[in-house]
Structures are given as C-alpha cells and as structure tokens.
Image (cartoon, rainbow, N blue to C red):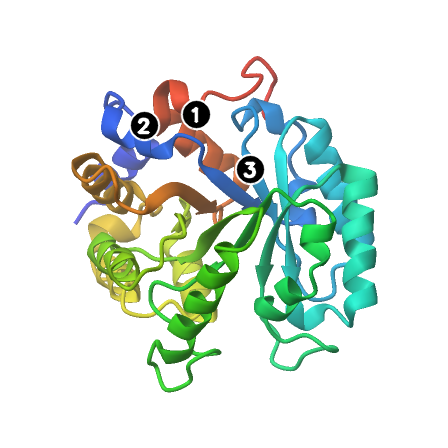
C-alpha cells in the first residue's frame, strides 16, 4: 500500500473557502502562551489580531519575573494580557498582592484567570480560586475581567470519584460571586474534542442557573501523539476516544490533528441558537503558537487578520 496519496494530501495548503459561520465563531478568540513558548515568537503582531486576549500560563517553578516580562511585552504589542494566578503555588496574601502590583505596575494588567493550579500540595495558604477571590485584592486593584476554570468533562483532582459534585458546587459559588462583582467574569474551560458533550454540558449549566459566559477550550493543530499525551496529562476524559479512534485510522494518523470538526459543529450550533452560552473560543496551541495562529487566520476570514500582517512571522 503506497503512502504517497496521504503525503501529497498533507503537503497541500487550505483550498476551501472560509465558512462564514466558523469565521463568526472565531471572532475575538483567545490563545494561551507560556514565557518559554512566547520567547520563540519574534512578532506576535504578524500572527494575532489586534487586542487578542492572551492568557499566560503560570507553570510551577516559573519565576514571577518571567511572567511579568512576558506580560509587559504582550501589553506593549497591544494585546489584552490575562496571566494565570494558580492558587496552590501562591504562598500567601502578601505574595498575591505583590504579584498583582508587579503585573499592574510593569505591564498594566487588568485581567486575570484564577484557578487552583496543577500541583497536588498547596505551597501555602491557598488551594482554590475561590480563596483568591475572597481576598478582595482583585477588586481593590480594579481588575476589569476575572475568569475562572470550567470543566466540561469534570476534573479528577476536584472530584476523585469521577462525578461533577464539587465542580458544580464551585460553579454555583462563582456564579454567586459574579452577581456581586464589578468585574466581568467568565468560564475558561479545559479543552475537549467532541462537540455534543460540550453542548450538553453548557446547556446543563444554563438550566441550573449558571449564566457565566463560556470561553470554550479548544486544542489547536498538533501531532496526534502530542494531543493524546496532553489529553491524558490534563485529565480530558470522554472525548479522548475521538483521538483514540483517529489513531486507529492510518489515513489520519499521518496527518496533524486540526480542530475543524469540533469548531464547525459548535459554530453551527451557536448560529442556530444565538443565546447559546459559549461566547468565545480559547485556544491551547499544543502544536505551537505559530501553527495555531495560521490555522485561525485561514479559517476566520476578516475576523482573524493579524494586527500587522506585513510583519514577517517568526
């Protein structure tokens, strides 16, 4: 059996016209970077639309100085910077206040993603995003946007029994906090690969009075092996079978995964149900920032044109 037909297909560039429904769904997408991945990009303005929200993931062991420097650079390029504040790696309220002061003083940060953080044992006083919110420091500092984590397929760190009991209780608490907060709040979710479970989860939130807008996590284009590795590490559950099924198909195994199918399905559902509570796409660029951005440019038409397309991408 010859592999040449599959290899030729891989080499071909995108030929399909832009789907306007998908382009609308990709408007105002966000993307996640880390200091070490951001360093690899010479010109963000050649890849990302103006004012794109850029989350900066704070991995355990990353010095706050590197986080702030990355935020400063992105802010200078005209992007809305949203650094992570992982509760379990923040020692105490004084440390949290220091981080906030650094971000605001050096990078004009007004947005934050608050989450528990992916470490088993807290480094200090905090173990949840709710405790960070309770300090009142973000409100005192005038943060305009506060995002918290959503888990369409649950989270074994929060609910070891595989249920959604604690996750759902946390969402109800965050909804109540939102109702008294001056900041705009939203859910930024873990990535998933299958549209219908995402839709069912989002509809269930609405039915249970959770009205926070959802920024749905989507894994960007990447090698299949890379996605499976990250999916297992991040606890992605039921929709992992989508990747496993793909891995069994030799015609797809040779090609990089692209999120076209899940994005198209979600976009169609949003177009048919304008009040659907997923408002934005949030990309995890597991195959690289440049690769993800170029995919979005190809799919999003005028909505994903880079801030300065004449700059040469790094």
Going from N to C along the chain, the mark reached first, 2 or 1, is 2
Going from N to C along the chain, the mark reached first, 2 or 3, is 2
- How would you rate the neighbour count of disc 2 (Cα within 10 Å): few for under 14, some for 14-19, many for 20 or more? many
Q: How many marks?
A: 3
Residue at position x 57%, y 23% from top?
46
Residue lying at the far front in this picture: please name it: 180
Q: Position of residue 249 (x, y in %)?
A: 20, 56
Are the residues at dot 2 and dot 3 in contact (C-beta closer than 8 Å)? no
Left or right for 176, reference 208: right
Q: Does any portion of residue 63 appear in the rendered image?
A: no
Residue lying at the far top in this picture: please name it: 310
Q: Using the numbered discs, state the Cα–Cα distance from disc 2 to disc 3 in whole angstroms.
A: 17 Å
Q: Does any portion of residue 184 appear in the rendered image?
A: yes
Left or right for 248, reference 183: left
Residue at position x 20%, y 55% from top?
196
Give 54 or 112, whichever is nearer the viewer. 112
In the rendered image, which residue does mark 1 sit on?
304
Residue at position x 31%, y 45% from top?
255
Q: Secondary structure at mark 3?
A: strand
Q: Using the numbered discs, state the Cα–Cα distance from disc 2 to disc 1 in whole angstroms.
A: 8 Å
Q: Please give the label number shown on residue 156.
A: none
Left or right for 94, reference 282: right
Are the residues at dot 2 and dot 1 in contact (C-beta closer than 8 Å)? yes
Q: Quadrant of the C terminus?
A: top right
In the rendered image, which residue does mark 3 sit on?
53
Q: Secondary structure at mark 1?
A: helix
Q: Position of residue 50 (x, y in %)?
A: 56, 24
Quadrant of the image occupied by residue 167: bottom left
Quadrant of the image occupied by residue 282: top left
**Relative to 209, is 237 above or below?**
below
In the rendered image, which residue does mark 2 sit on?
23
- How would you rate the neighbour count of disc 1 (Cα within 10 Å): few for under 14, some for 14-19, many for 20 or more? many
């Amino acid at each position: 059996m010859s592999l040449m037909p599959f290899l030729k297909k891989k080499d071909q560039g995108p030929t399909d016209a832009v789907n306007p429904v998908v382009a609308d769904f990709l408007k105002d997408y966000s993307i996640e970077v880390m200091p070490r991945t951001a360093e690899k990009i010479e010109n963000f303005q050649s890849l990302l639309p103006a004012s794109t929200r850029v989350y900066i993931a704070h991995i355990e062991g990353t010095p706050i100085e590197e986080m702030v420097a990355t935020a400063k650079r992105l802010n200078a390029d005209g992007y809305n910077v949203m650094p992570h504040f992982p509760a379990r790696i923040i020692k105490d309220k004084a440390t949290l206040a220091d981080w906030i002061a650094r971000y605001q003083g050096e990078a004009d940060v007004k947005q934050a993603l608050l989450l528990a953080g992916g470490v088993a044992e807290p480094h200090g006083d905090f173990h949840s995003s709710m405790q960070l919110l309770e300090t009142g420091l973000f409100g005192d500092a005038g943060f305009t946007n506060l995002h918290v984590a959503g888990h369409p397929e649950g989270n074994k760190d929060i609910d070891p029994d595989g249920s959604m009991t604690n996750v759902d209780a946390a969402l109800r608490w965050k909804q109540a906090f939102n109702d008294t907060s001056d900041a705009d709040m939203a859910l930024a979710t873990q990535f998933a690969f299958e549209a219908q479970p995402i839709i069912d989860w989002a509809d269930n939130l609405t039915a249970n009075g959770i009205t926070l807008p959802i920024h749905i996590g989507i894994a960007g284009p990447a090698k299949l092996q890379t996605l499976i590795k990250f999916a297992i590490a991040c606890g992605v559950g039921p929709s992992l079978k989508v990747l496993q099924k793909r891995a069994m198909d030799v015609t797809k195994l040779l090609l990089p995964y692209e999120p076209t199918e899940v994005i198209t399905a979600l976009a169609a559902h949003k177009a048919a149900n304008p009040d659907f509570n997923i408002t934005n796409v949030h990309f995890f660029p597991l195959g690289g920032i440049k690769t993800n951005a170029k995919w979005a440019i190809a799919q999003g038409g005028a909505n994903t044109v880079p801030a300065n397309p004449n700059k040469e991408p790094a």
